[in-house]
Image (cartoon, rainbow, N blue to C red):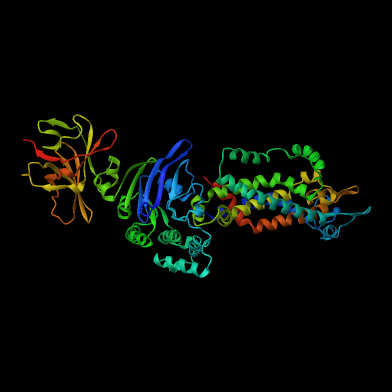
Amino acid sequence: MTEKSLKGLQLDRIVKRYKGDTVLNGISLSVDSGSTLVLFGPSGAGKTVLLRTIAGVIEPDSGQVSINGQDMSGVDPEDRGVGMAFQNFALFPHMSAYKNIASSIEVKERSASRLDAAVRSVAELLKIDQVLDHAPRALSNGQKQRTALARALVGSPSLLLLDDPLRNVDAKLRFEMRIELPALLAQQGTTVVYVTQDYKEAMALGDTIVVMTEGNIQQTGTPAEIYLSPATIDIAKQFGDPVINLFDVTPQRDNKGQYISLSNSRIYLENGIADLTNGEYVLGIRPQALRFSSASDEESIAATVEAVTPLNEKTVTLLLTAGGRELLLSRPAGLDDPEQGPVHVSFDPSAIHLFEKDSGKRVELINTKTEAVA
Amino acid sequence: MLETSPLETFLRGVAILLVILFFMFPIFWIVLMSFQTNETILRIPPSFIFEPTFDNYRALITGKLETNAASLDIAFMRNMGNSVLLSVGAVLLALILGVPAAYSFARHKTRFSEDIAFTLLSFRFAPPLLVLLPLTIYFQKLGLSDTYFGLIWVYQLICLPLILWIVRGYFEDISEDVEYAYRIGGHSWFETFRKIAVPLAGPGIAAAGLLAFIFAWNNFIFALVLASADKQPVTVGALAFVTASGIQYGQIAAAIVLSITPTLLLAVYAQKYLVEGLSLGAVKG
């Protein structure tokens, strides 16, 4: 295998069933050596089972796991050379933090002094060197989480599996770790598979994000790709805060082409794409893509302000259009926003998303533009 | 909790006292009996006032029973030794076999594991006497009757299901992630069992072991049928006090006191584990 095609991790059609329920439905993916892949999805999507399959503690019914180009079929978890941190920390309650960390390398590191040095250096890196002699029950949640992370990192594994490690820690620590972790992981130079249900974590940490639901991969892409071109309505809803505005629409056709009617403007969809006329679709506009505009702007949508929620760094305004549709608009804080009464909003037509209503699948649009109704 | 009135506290105390009296009186009476001669025990009406004597204990420990008619040899101390040997041996064997089996039932569920576990439990349903007759014949053919090993083997009918079922619940309570974490850390499954599962299930194993010990110690019927005089435990040995010249109540009482002492001490010592252990197993969802 050449250097160029070396994959830190490769999964080939992994299938896992439990009593007739398909938990993993033929998952294939690959992670470049040294990069971070985030598995994102709701609970029950199969993320944790997939991670355990990679670690070797769960046997897949079929499919192949390769780590650094080597087939892992029949290789016991202790021989795979991976590090793993668990959502519930999974510390050994009858061992001190030091022993917990040391347990990961005590088998292969015969030299007591090198083992000690390795444990202390990773503990220092994670700022838990003061509590190494404490039992897990004497540690705070943050310290437990760092101990679990230290245990996964200490052996410098070539593949690091992190199962939602920030799930059970408080918001402040989660925020800190979200900043610290990427640097830490880059420093280690390991291939990382990171499971999370938090889209911000996914965006902050992932070189690639894999969105899973019900044992299937919905979309694979960079954080920007997932955010800017979500493959389904669900993904569009999960990535972004406040949540994307969605409307049921039925495209029509006039002499200029296909259009979607929104208040007093028409959004024309470039000819050359499939005929959407009279089908049922869902239009999505991110709250960040909307802006207040003046009434003189002919393409703008008339609406009234229903509620304003200042969120420190941004202000979210709930609007009601003349047609009775609710719209969320998000702007950076500190701007002079209308607090109430009638307003006009407009948006960049290229920022809209269109999905099929039944399947939820994305419809690729090209060259959308808005025009006021004459 | 609401404040309790002095009256309520008093009534509660009386109620507890009554319960303790009800359950503890027979034991208390036996302890009193063990310090009396047959004559004072059998007088009517019975009385708490008597001149204590250590004759009963002396007879048991020296092995010489002096009655009005003759001097009898009694093998009580040997019976005690047998009881200790049989119970400890049976519990150790049951732990060696039962703990790994319990782990297997808890962690590696296969199609028939539930059925096998239930079958093992069902050994406790059958009346021992039903099993004993065929077993006696088998044991004679195999040369196992009247051997310590044979008895310890039969005692597994008592100890093994108990340990298996109690300890299994404990293993199931341990988070699988903890074991996974240890394996991913480079340890074999056996190391994981030894260093993680067994220590974490420790209180449960101790409680199950203690309970099995008590059941084994109190067993009567297996040893009665399968062992000859020199291999019999105290439970069977106590029969020897029913002599031709009468029933030796004093010695029986002393024998009871001596024979409940080891289990009592063990239970007091391990009480914390026993209560914690058994109730933990019970509330498992």
The residue furthest right is B69
Q: Residue B22, image x and y in percent?
A: 68, 49
Side of B228 where A31 appears, left or right? left
Answer above or below: position of A212 versus A2: above
Q: Which image quadrant for residue B266?
A: bottom right
Side of A153 where B149 appears, left or right? right
Q: Which image quadrant for residue A352?
A: top left
Q: Which of A35 and A102 is in front in this view?
A: A35
Q: Which of B148 and A271 is in front in this view?
A: A271
Q: Which of A132 and A204 is in front in this view?
A: A204
Q: Residue B1, image x and y in percent?
A: 48, 53
Is residue A110 among what the camera can see?
yes
The residue furthest bottom is A113
The residue furthest front is A2
Q: Residue at x 77, y 40 (%)?
A: B135
Q: Residue at x 13, y 54 (%)?
A: A336
Q: Residue B116, image x and y in percent?
A: 62, 39
Is residue B47 among what the camera can see?
no
Side of B267 where A267 appears, left or right? left
Side of B97 where A59 appears, left or right? left
Q: How many labels does the image show?
A: 0
